[in-house]
Amino acid sequence: MADPTKVDPIHQFHINTLIPIEIGGYDVSFTNSSLLMIVTAVLAGGFLFIATSSRGTVPGRAQSIAEISYEFIASMLRDSAGSQGMKFFPFVFTLFMFVLVANLLGMFPYFITVTSHLIITAALAILVFVIVLVYGLWKHGFRFFKLFVPEGIPVVLMPLVVAIEVISFLTRPISHSVRLFANMLAGHITLKVFSGFVVSLTSLGAVGIVGAILPLTMAVGLTALEFLIAFLQAYVFAMLTCIYINDAIHPGH
């Protein structure tokens, strides 16, 4: 009988309990997903600490990567939200590094991709939404609601436009989280399917090995594409966060 872990493309996303914990009737067990999130945070933080602990006039490879990452996010935030947005830099930079490292870790065997779990991406998106909403109301009070009233809209269309803007604002966490979740999930499933074709065909002998050349080529190409998508999805998640932060800082623009 075939090993189900080798033919089931969904198996790689299963959450397994490592340390069962129950508090007040609620299951708060420590899982493989929890472990990977800790590993992600430790690796991202550890790399940045090591890269910047011995800063030199002529940066080494690790320091150069850290500085490029810093300036990349800083430039993105300044372009999206202006100089006032830099107060959110630690938050955006942390989000970007966490998502990027989590995406990259998921490319290695025996590691799960925590960003392919909707509960993880939804939690991050809701965190962004709450920060934007709380800061916007704290900074601007009721003037924050100017965000839902675009300038230059005819009065007759105002109710419709405001309704659309409110719905768009409230559904941000959905689009923000599903975009990352769906891309990582679909990419890894596609890669596992093509890899499964290779394994299945090679078991058929010489003819199967020849037939496996095409799916093997596709699997290699998809692997390279997945590494690119891992970065792009972290970039898109951070970019949308910057845009939403701009709305909290400049609700009337």
Image: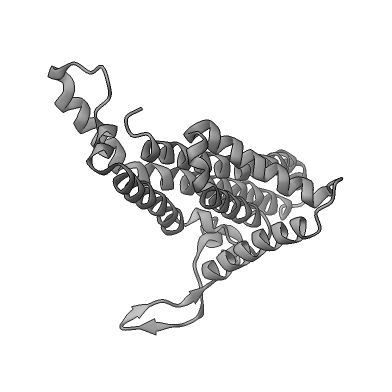
- The location of residue 239, given as percent across then percent down, is 51, 38
| Identity of the residue drawn at 58% across and 55% down | 98
In this rendering, the answer to whether 19 lies above or below 245 is: below
Residue 223 visible (yes or no): no
Tell me the quarter of the image containing the N terminus: bottom right
Q: Quadrant of residue 120?
A: bottom left
Figure colour scheme:
one colour
In this rendering, the answer to whether 170 lies above or below 250 is: below
Q: In front: 67, or 16?
A: 67
Q: Is residue 122 left or right of residue 50?
A: left
Tell me the quarter of the image containing the C terminus: top left
- The location of residue 124, given as percent across then percent down, is 44, 54
Q: In front: 96, or 197?
A: 96
Residue 235 visible (yes or no): yes
| Identity of the residue drawn at 76% across and 56% down | 51
| Identity of the residue drawn at 72% across and 49% down | 66
| Identity of the residue drawn at 50% across and 65% down | 14
- The location of residue 218, given as percent across then percent down, is 68, 39
Q: In front: 96, or 214?
A: 96
- The location of residue 243, given as percent across then percent down, is 44, 36
